[in-house]
Image (cartoon, grey):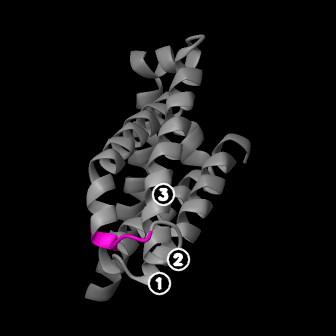
Amino acid sequence: MDRGYFWRTGYRVLLEAYKVSLFTLCQWIETTSLSIAIREGALYYPILGAFHLAAIGWFGGMVLMGDLNVLGIGLHLPAAEVFSQFRRWKWLGFAIVAISGGLLWWAEPVVCYKSISFWIKLALLALVAVNAFCFRKSRLGASLSLVLWVAIVFAGRGIAFL
């Protein structure tokens, strides 16, 4: 018996089962009362969208100020001082972005599952996390952070239109 064939087949079956179960999970979430209320309510979705965009501006502004400081543009303070001053506000903005984004996803999980822009946005968010931990407070990291965040904004807008 070829053990390699067994493992390749097993992984393929596992990956297919994962895809089916993830889509099934999205379909189930779409039928929950919270999802229906957000999606079909007259004001819930637009209000969540407004909070999400405002929090992106808030959080993005904090990221922009920190990255520009690392690049030597803007505030002429040590980077550690700038990061410590904005840390609490930055995390508050991130929390609002994450909660409002999660609720927006909860309203339309199947649409997001089928959207290539959504998957690109998730991949870019993962790259931002890697960048934040690997290239923290370096010129390369700051430049890469700015490019990735702009790409995330465009991918996020693509979810609604593509």
Membership of 111 in magenta stretch = no
Q: Local crowd at mark 1 within 10 Å, few (<14), some, or many (≥20)?
A: some
Nearer-the-camera pick, 139 or 27? 139
Q: Is residue 75 visible?
A: yes
Residue at image mark 1:
140
Q: Residue at x 48, y 57 (%)?
A: 122
Where is residue 20 shown, x and y percent of the image? 44, 48
Nearer-the-camera pick, 63 or 127? 63
Q: Are marks 2 and 1 in contact (CB under 8 Å)?
A: yes
Q: Nearer the viewer, mark 1 or mark 3?
A: 1
Which one is earlier in the sequence, the residue at label 2 or at label 3? 3
Q: Residue furthest top?
A: 42
The amino acid at mark 2 is Ser
Residue at image mark 2:
143
The amino acid at mark 1 is Leu
Q: Are marks 1 and 3 in contact (CB under 8 Å)?
A: no
Q: Is residue 161 left or right of residue 80?
A: right
Q: How far is mark 1 from mark 3, CA to CA? A: 22 Å
Where is residue 142 shown, x and y percent of the image? 46, 75
Q: Are marks 2 and 3 in contact (CB under 8 Å)?
A: no
Q: Residue at x 37, y 70 (%)?
A: 77
Where is residue 75 shown, x and y percent of the image? 46, 66
Q: Secondary structure at mark 1?
A: helix
Q: Quadrant of the N terminus?
A: bottom left
Q: Residue at x 34, y 63 (%)?
A: 82
Q: Give the residues drawn in magenta, as a range.
A: 76-80
Q: Is residue 140 above or below residue 129?
A: below
Q: Secondary structure at mark 2?
A: helix
Residue at image mark 3:
122
The amino acid at mark 3 is Leu
Q: Secondary structure at mark 3?
A: helix
